[in-house]
Image: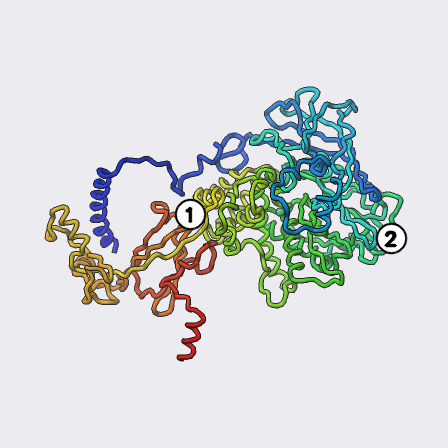
């Protein structure tokens, strides 16, 4: 069989060389730039250096800055104001000397003179909530934003500063040398916004029935910007939709709230005995040993009893966190609180939930169990969750993440009933937001620049975690559901987006604020791309090892997209430049089909190809080495006496070759394929992808063959496979399990299936 191919090819090479020479004479020579889809990503990537290695790991000179905070915070529930005094200690681990520091003032996005509303250019919305209409067109703008009362050094001496919208530049009294530290104080306050009406990611929800508020407080203090080797100061303004870039640091935060409130947030509670009742303390002890169900620390009855109190006195909750990139907290007298332990590696972590009674019974039943399951799944896919707790807070219409704490939607109806949509939505958002502890809270990518690095990676693991959760808790699934109904992850779900109007699609490698269809761009498509990479291109074993390697290399560090792309290749021996290029740098889509299938026979008679070749070269048939002539069924070389179901019997050269070169014993073991096909695959879609072809044979059996994407390296439009088979092929289907996000499946099946109209089907029924 090997030599059979050799003869055939040697003739082929002679003729193509001659053909190419002719072409050269006739055509004007034109150069072209390299558009091969398998070319390396050198043009797009920055050159590796001492900070970031070519392997995708942190380099030998990798550094990151540190910002430590000591804060005293007071929440004024009566006036919905929050004030703070913070001391920031900034450590310059960079090799550079710094003349000034940049501090982020995200709340200024809500200032009266905020420019955020001014950059929206989409005109009148078709529908608006009454509250939106009133606040946009009938009311003075909300008086939010930081009131900065003091910026001073440790001796209290004022420091010069300048505020440019959401960024504050503080002049250093003297240059902060590489390796040096500088401490400064900021005193501030602001009016807390209603996050339900104002669509903020932090603020309060007001409950008119009892006059209480639940507070979810974040982006609430002046926070250091990131300074690093790729951006210098990352001081891009905050417009609202994009997220954050933050350095790691240690936090000591004292938060004073009404004494009937409970509170939880980032970090360890260091004065539990001062703020917990004896009963709460006992329940807390139990919760630490409860691994299968949550223990309620503050019950619904206890929380409801406080709703009319409005305590005049206050309590201070003290929290301490190490190596976190941010700090957030939730507080209210309305909160119910439950906890349960979960084993992560050899450590116990607390899964925690905070929710008003309006979240029950859904939240009491499921929130903490979802948190625990999420920590297990993500720890398996990345690294053991390193913090001591993870809190899920119920907040209307929220889905937002901070270290150890996140806000999640999913509100039942007033009578406590809820739809599947509410239930799965709540479970999905908790998995997603708790998952953000891993990306970007620990694997600390720059969200302001690259939304997909946390949202895409997180949404990908979310899918894995949702499927895990459905398997661990089948009782959580509704009747008729065997699996958790994930919205994002499965390939076919991204088809409407990728096959949609190109005017509204941007490459994943775009800044989040600048794209249409944000959710599909930064969440759905990268998550699906990674899922396809895992399931179809690399296989879970290779993918999971490399993905874990990326997470572990960059935990508690600041990765860039290249660090991810490079690590995935470095740890797997998979050249993926083509995949990153196609899926992340372009808006191409997948469409692979079957163009045609031709049956071939072998023959003893010279075919047209060889006759033409001899006519051109002036040779004679008698001078040729013995050859096997390939004849397409129905072509001019084809004759009826070519026998079906055998290849060997139609060719004397093949028969003689077998007789001369193999013993009868060896011939017994030689394969004698009976059918020969030329199958041409077409690729109308721009993305190169593996061809997954399912061949079904006349005897009803089938087999699926995956041709690696590299099959397209020499021809981006169509490729052909010569297939010698024992059995007759009766049908071929491309991507039979819908795993590649093929946008047009009408070309996926051979022979083309006629779509019968309902009338035809009706006629057939009448006949039979
Ligand atoms: Zn997210």
Left or right of 702: which side holds 13?
left
Seen from the viewer's position, the closer of residues 560 and 339 is 560
Query: For the residue carrying disc 2, how many other residues have a C-alpha within 10 Å: few (<14), some (14-19), or many (20+)?
Result: few
Image point 85% across, 50% down: which residue? 277
Q: Which mark is residue 250?
A: none
Seen from the viewer's position, the closer of residues 170 and 9 is 170
Image point 66% across, 24% down: which residue? 100
Calculate the distance from the C-alpha at mark 2 to the C-alpha at mark 1. 63 Å
Image point 65% across, 62% down: which residue? 420
Left or right of 152: which side holds 436?
left
Q: How is the image coloured?
A: rainbow
Percent coordinates x, y for residue 485 in the rendering: 59, 60
The relative height of residue 727 versus residue 330 in the rendered view (above or below) is below
Q: Secondary structure at mark 1?
A: loop
Q: Where, by quadrant of the figure, is residue 410 drawn?
A: bottom right
Seen from the viewer's position, the closer of residues 667 and 502 is 502
Seen from the viewer's position, the closer of residues 448 and 241 is 241
The relative height of residue 588 versus residue 301 in the rendered view (above or below) is above
Percent coordinates x, y for residue 578 in the rendering: 43, 44
Cβ of mark 1 under 8 Å from ligand 1: the answer is: no
The relative height of residue 266 versus residue 493 in the rendered view (above or below) is above
Left or right of 252: which side holds 721?
left
Q: Which mark is residue 686?
A: 1
Report the number of numbered marks.
2
Cβ of mark 2 under 8 Å from ligand 1: the answer is: no
Q: Which residue is mark 2?
A: 308
Task: Confirm whether residue 541 shows in the render.
Answer: no
Q: Where, by quadrant of the figure, is residue 448 drawn?
A: top right
Q: Where, by quadrant of the figure, is residue 4 drawn?
A: bottom left
Check the image and name the residue furthest to the right: 312
Label 2 or label 1, whichever comes before in sequence order? 2
Task: Confirm whether residue 620 shows in the render.
Answer: yes
């Amino acid at each position: 069989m090997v030599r059979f191919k050799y003869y055939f090819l040697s003739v082929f090479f002679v003729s193509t060389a001659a053909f190419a020479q002719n072409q050269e004479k006739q055509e004007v020579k034109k150069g072209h730039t390299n558009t091969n889809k398998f070319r390396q990503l050198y043009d797009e990537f920055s050159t590796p250096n001492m900070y970031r290695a070519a392997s995708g790991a942190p380099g030998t000179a990798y550094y990151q800055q540190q910002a430590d905070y000591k804060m005293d915070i007071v929440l004024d529930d009566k006036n919905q104001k929050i004030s703070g005094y913070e001391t920031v200690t900034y450590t310059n681990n960079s090799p550079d000397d710094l003349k000034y520091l940049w501090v982020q003032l995200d709340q200024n996005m809500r200032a009266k003179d905020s420019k955020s509303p001014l950059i929206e250019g989409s005109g009148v919305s078709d529908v608006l909530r009454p509250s939106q209409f009133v606040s946009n067109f009938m009311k003075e703008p909300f008086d939010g934003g930081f009131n900065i009362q003091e910026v001073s050094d440790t001796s209290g001496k004022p420091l010069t500063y300048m505020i440019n919208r959401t960024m504050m530049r503080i002049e250093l009294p003297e240059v902060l040398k590489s390796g040096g530290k500088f401490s400064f104080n900021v005193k501030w306050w602001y009016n807390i916004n209603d996050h339900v009406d104002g669509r903020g990611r932090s603020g309060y929800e007001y409950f008119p029935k009892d006059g209480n508020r639940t507070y979810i407080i974040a982006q609430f203090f002046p926070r250091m910007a990131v300074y690093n080797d790729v951006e210098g100061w990352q001081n891009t303004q905050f417009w609202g939709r994009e997220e954050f870039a933050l350095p790691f640091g240690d936090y000591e935060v004292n938060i004073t709230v009404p004494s009937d409130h409970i509170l939880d947030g980032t970090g360890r509670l260091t004065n539990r005995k001062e703020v917990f009742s004896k009963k709460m303390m006992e329940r807390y002890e139990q919760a630490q040993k409860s691994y299968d169900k949550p223990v309620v620390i503050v019950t619904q009855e206890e929380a409801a009893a406080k709703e009319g109190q409005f305590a005049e006195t206050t309590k201070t909750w003290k929290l301490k966190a190490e190596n976190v990139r941010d700090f957030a907290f939730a507080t209210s007298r309305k909160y119910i609180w439950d906890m349960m332990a979960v084993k992560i590696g050899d450590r116990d972590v607390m899964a925690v939930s905070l929710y008003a009674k309006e979240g029950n019974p859904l939240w009491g039943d499921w929130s903490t169990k979802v948190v625990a399951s999420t920590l297990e799944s993500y720890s398996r896919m990345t690294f053991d969750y390193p913090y001591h707790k993870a809190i899920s807070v119920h907040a209307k219409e929220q889905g937002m993440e901070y270290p150890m704490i996140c806000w999640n939607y999913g509100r039942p109806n007033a009578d406590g009933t809820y739809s599947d949509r509410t239930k799965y939505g709540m479970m999905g958002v908790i998995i997603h937001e708790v998952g953000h502890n891993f990306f970007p809270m620990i694997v600390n990518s720059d969200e302001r620049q690259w939304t997909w690095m946390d949202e895409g990676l997180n949404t990908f693991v979310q899918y894995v975690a949702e499927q895990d959760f459905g398997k661990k808790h089948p009782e959580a699934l509704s009747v008729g559901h065997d699996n958790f109904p994930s919205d994002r992850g499965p390939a076919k779900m991204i088809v409407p987006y990728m096959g949609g109007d190109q005017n509204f699609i941007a490459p994943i490698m775009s800044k989040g604020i600048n794209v249409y269809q944000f959710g599909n761009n930064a969440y759905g498509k990268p998550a699906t791309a990674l899922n396809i990479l895992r399931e179809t291109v690399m296989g879970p074993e290779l993918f999971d090892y490399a993905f874990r390697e990326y997470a572990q290399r960059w935990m508690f560090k600041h990765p860039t997209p290249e660090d991810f792309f490079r690590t995935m290749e470095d740890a797997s021996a998979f050249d993926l430049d083509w995949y990153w290029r196609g899926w992340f740098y372009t808006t191409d889509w997948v469409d692979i089909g079957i163009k045609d299938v031709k049956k071939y026979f072998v023959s003893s008679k010279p075919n047209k190809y060889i006759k033409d070749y001899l006519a051109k070269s002036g040779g004679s048939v008698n001078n040729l080495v013995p050859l096997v002539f390939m004849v397409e069924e129905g072509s001019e070389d084809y004759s009826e006496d070519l026998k079906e179901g055998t290849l060997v019997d139609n060719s004397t050269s093949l028969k003689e070759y077998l007789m001369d070169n193999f013993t009868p014993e060896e011939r017994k073991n030689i394969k004698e394929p009976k059918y020969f096909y030329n199958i041409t695959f077409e690729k109308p879609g721009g993305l190169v992808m593996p061809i997954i072809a399912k061949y079904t044979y006349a005897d009803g059996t089938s087999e699926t063959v995956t041709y690696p994407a590299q099959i397209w390296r020499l021809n981006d439009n169509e490729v052909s496979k010569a297939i010698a088979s024992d059995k007759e092929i009766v049908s071929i289907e491309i991507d039979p399990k819908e795993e590649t996000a093929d946008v047009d499946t009408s070309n996926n099946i051979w022979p083309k299936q006629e779509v019968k109209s309902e009338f035809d089907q009706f006629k057939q029924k009448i006949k039979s």
